[in-house]
Amino acid sequence: MKFLIGLAFLLLNTVMAIGQSPDYFLKTSDGELAMELSRGSQSINIALFFFKASELEQVIIERSLDSQKNFNQCSYVSFNESAKDSTVIVKKDIYPISVAGSVFYRVKVVNREGITRTYPSVRLPGIAEAKD
Protein backbone atom coordinates (compact mmCIF):
# COMPACT_ATOMS: atom_id res chain seq x y z
CA MET A 1 0.00 0.00 0.00
CA LYS A 2 2.82 2.44 0.85
CA PHE A 3 4.40 1.61 -2.52
CA LEU A 4 1.13 2.47 -4.30
CA ILE A 5 0.82 5.80 -2.49
CA GLY A 6 4.48 6.60 -3.20
CA LEU A 7 4.02 5.75 -6.87
CA ALA A 8 0.89 7.92 -7.07
CA PHE A 9 2.69 10.90 -5.56
CA LEU A 10 5.63 10.40 -7.92
CA LEU A 11 3.20 10.45 -10.85
CA LEU A 12 1.49 13.52 -9.43
CA ASN A 13 4.78 15.40 -9.04
CA THR A 14 5.85 14.42 -12.56
CA VAL A 15 2.59 15.72 -14.01
CA MET A 16 2.93 18.95 -12.02
CA ALA A 17 6.50 19.44 -13.24
CA ILE A 18 5.35 19.16 -16.85
CA GLY A 19 2.59 21.72 -16.31
CA GLN A 20 -1.06 21.76 -15.36
CA SER A 21 -3.61 21.33 -18.10
CA PRO A 22 -7.20 22.54 -17.67
CA ASP A 23 -8.28 19.08 -18.84
CA TYR A 24 -8.01 15.88 -16.83
CA PHE A 25 -6.15 17.30 -13.80
CA LEU A 26 -6.42 19.78 -10.91
CA LYS A 27 -4.10 20.55 -8.02
CA THR A 28 -5.58 23.02 -5.55
CA SER A 29 -3.67 26.19 -4.70
CA ASP A 30 -4.06 25.53 -0.97
CA GLY A 31 -2.28 22.18 -1.32
CA GLU A 32 -5.20 20.23 0.11
CA LEU A 33 -5.90 17.87 -2.78
CA ALA A 34 -5.39 16.97 -6.40
CA MET A 35 -7.78 15.24 -8.79
CA GLU A 36 -7.07 13.36 -12.00
CA LEU A 37 -9.74 12.11 -14.43
CA SER A 38 -9.47 9.29 -16.96
CA ARG A 39 -11.80 7.14 -19.01
CA GLY A 40 -11.94 3.44 -18.23
CA SER A 41 -13.59 0.82 -20.40
CA GLN A 42 -16.95 1.04 -18.59
CA SER A 43 -16.60 4.08 -16.32
CA ILE A 44 -14.79 7.31 -15.53
CA ASN A 45 -11.96 6.98 -13.03
CA ILE A 46 -11.62 9.81 -10.53
CA ALA A 47 -8.31 9.67 -8.66
CA LEU A 48 -8.16 11.89 -5.58
CA PHE A 49 -4.84 12.66 -3.90
CA PHE A 50 -5.26 14.11 -0.41
CA PHE A 51 -2.34 15.84 1.29
CA LYS A 52 -4.14 16.81 4.53
CA ALA A 53 -6.79 14.09 4.86
CA SER A 54 -6.70 14.14 8.66
CA GLU A 55 -8.27 17.63 8.54
CA LEU A 56 -11.21 16.53 6.35
CA GLU A 57 -14.66 15.28 7.31
CA GLN A 58 -16.08 14.53 3.87
CA VAL A 59 -15.55 15.04 0.15
CA ILE A 60 -18.33 15.30 -2.40
CA ILE A 61 -17.61 14.68 -6.09
CA GLU A 62 -20.00 16.40 -8.49
CA ARG A 63 -20.42 16.34 -12.27
CA SER A 64 -22.09 18.49 -14.92
CA LEU A 65 -22.21 19.13 -18.65
CA ASP A 66 -21.54 22.82 -17.89
CA SER A 67 -18.34 24.09 -16.26
CA GLN A 68 -20.13 26.60 -14.02
CA LYS A 69 -23.60 25.32 -13.07
CA ASN A 70 -25.99 22.38 -12.77
CA PHE A 71 -23.62 20.13 -10.79
CA ASN A 72 -25.02 16.95 -9.23
CA GLN A 73 -23.39 14.63 -6.73
CA CYS A 74 -21.97 11.43 -8.21
CA SER A 75 -19.75 10.17 -5.37
CA TYR A 76 -18.94 10.72 -1.72
CA VAL A 77 -15.96 10.06 0.55
CA SER A 78 -16.18 10.19 4.34
CA PHE A 79 -13.07 10.32 6.53
CA ASN A 80 -12.70 9.12 10.10
CA GLU A 81 -10.42 10.79 12.62
CA SER A 82 -7.62 8.28 12.05
CA ALA A 83 -7.23 9.18 8.35
CA LYS A 84 -3.64 9.52 7.22
CA ASP A 85 -2.59 12.86 5.73
CA SER A 86 -1.28 11.43 2.46
CA THR A 87 -4.12 9.37 1.03
CA VAL A 88 -5.06 8.26 -2.47
CA ILE A 89 -8.64 7.26 -3.27
CA VAL A 90 -9.95 6.19 -6.68
CA LYS A 91 -13.69 6.42 -7.29
CA LYS A 92 -15.53 5.29 -10.40
CA ASP A 93 -18.42 7.05 -12.06
CA ILE A 94 -20.16 4.02 -13.58
CA TYR A 95 -23.04 6.10 -14.97
CA PRO A 96 -21.30 8.97 -16.81
CA ILE A 97 -23.50 11.77 -18.12
CA SER A 98 -21.94 11.78 -21.59
CA VAL A 99 -19.35 9.77 -23.48
CA ALA A 100 -19.40 11.79 -26.68
CA GLY A 101 -19.21 15.28 -25.16
CA SER A 102 -17.20 16.92 -22.41
CA VAL A 103 -18.09 16.32 -18.77
CA PHE A 104 -16.98 18.54 -15.89
CA TYR A 105 -16.14 17.21 -12.42
CA ARG A 106 -15.52 19.23 -9.28
CA VAL A 107 -14.84 18.54 -5.64
CA LYS A 108 -16.47 19.98 -2.53
CA VAL A 109 -14.54 19.50 0.70
CA VAL A 110 -15.92 19.82 4.23
CA ASN A 111 -13.26 20.07 6.94
CA ARG A 112 -13.60 19.04 10.60
CA GLU A 113 -14.74 22.57 11.57
CA GLY A 114 -17.63 22.36 9.07
CA ILE A 115 -16.14 24.79 6.53
CA THR A 116 -17.04 23.89 2.94
CA ARG A 117 -14.79 24.66 -0.02
CA THR A 118 -15.80 24.14 -3.64
CA TYR A 119 -12.89 23.83 -6.06
CA PRO A 120 -12.89 24.68 -9.79
CA SER A 121 -14.19 22.11 -12.21
CA VAL A 122 -11.98 19.88 -14.36
CA ARG A 123 -12.98 19.02 -17.91
CA LEU A 124 -12.89 15.47 -19.19
CA PRO A 125 -13.10 15.80 -22.99
CA GLY A 126 -15.49 13.55 -24.88
CA ILE A 127 -14.10 10.59 -26.80
CA ALA A 128 -14.35 12.43 -30.14
CA GLU A 129 -12.53 15.48 -28.70
CA ALA A 130 -9.80 13.43 -27.06
CA LYS A 131 -8.81 11.79 -30.34
CA ASP A 132 -8.26 15.13 -32.11
Image (cartoon, rainbow, N blue to C red):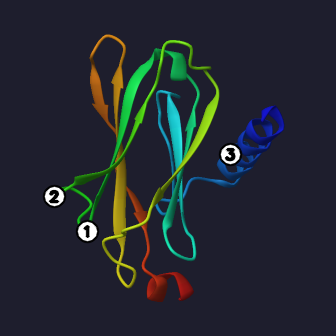
| The one of 92 and 5 positioned closer to us in this rendering | 92
Asked whether, in this view, residue 5 is left or right of residue 97, the answer is right
| Distance Cα–Cα, label 2 vs label 3 | 29 Å
| Distance Cα–Cα, label 1 vs label 2 | 8 Å
Identify residue for label 1. 65
| The one of 130 and 112 positioned closer to us in this rendering | 112
- Tell me which residue sits at (52%, 16%) in the image: 54
Q: Can residue 128 be seen in this view?
A: yes
Q: Residue furthest right?
A: 3
Q: Is residue 24 visible?
A: no
Which mark, residue 19?
Answer: none
User: Amino acid under label 3?
Assistant: Leu
- Quadrant assignment, res 119: top left
Identify residue for label 3. 12
How many neighbours does mark 1 have within 10 angstroms: few (below 14), some (14-19), or many (20 or more)? some
**Do the residues under discs 1 and 2 have CB atoms within 8 angstroms?**
yes
How many neighbours does mark 2 have within 10 angstroms: few (below 14), some (14-19), or many (20 or more)? few
How many neighbours does mark 3 have within 10 angstroms: few (below 14), some (14-19), or many (20 or more)? some
Asked whether, in this view, residue 50 is left or right of residue 72, the answer is right
User: Amino acid under label 2?
Assistant: Asn
- Tell me which residue sits at (79%, 43%) in the image: 7
Q: Going from the N terminus, do you reach mark 2 or mark 3 first?
A: 3
Q: In this view, does 30 lie above or below 121?
A: above
Q: Position of residue 50 (x, y in %)?
A: 56, 32
Q: Position of residue 21 (x, y in %)?
A: 53, 59
Q: Going from the N terminus, do you reach mark 1 or mark 2 first?
A: 1
Q: Which residue lies furthest to the left in this view?
A: 70
Q: Going from the N terminus, do you reach mark 3 or mark 1 first?
A: 3
Identify residue for label 2. 70
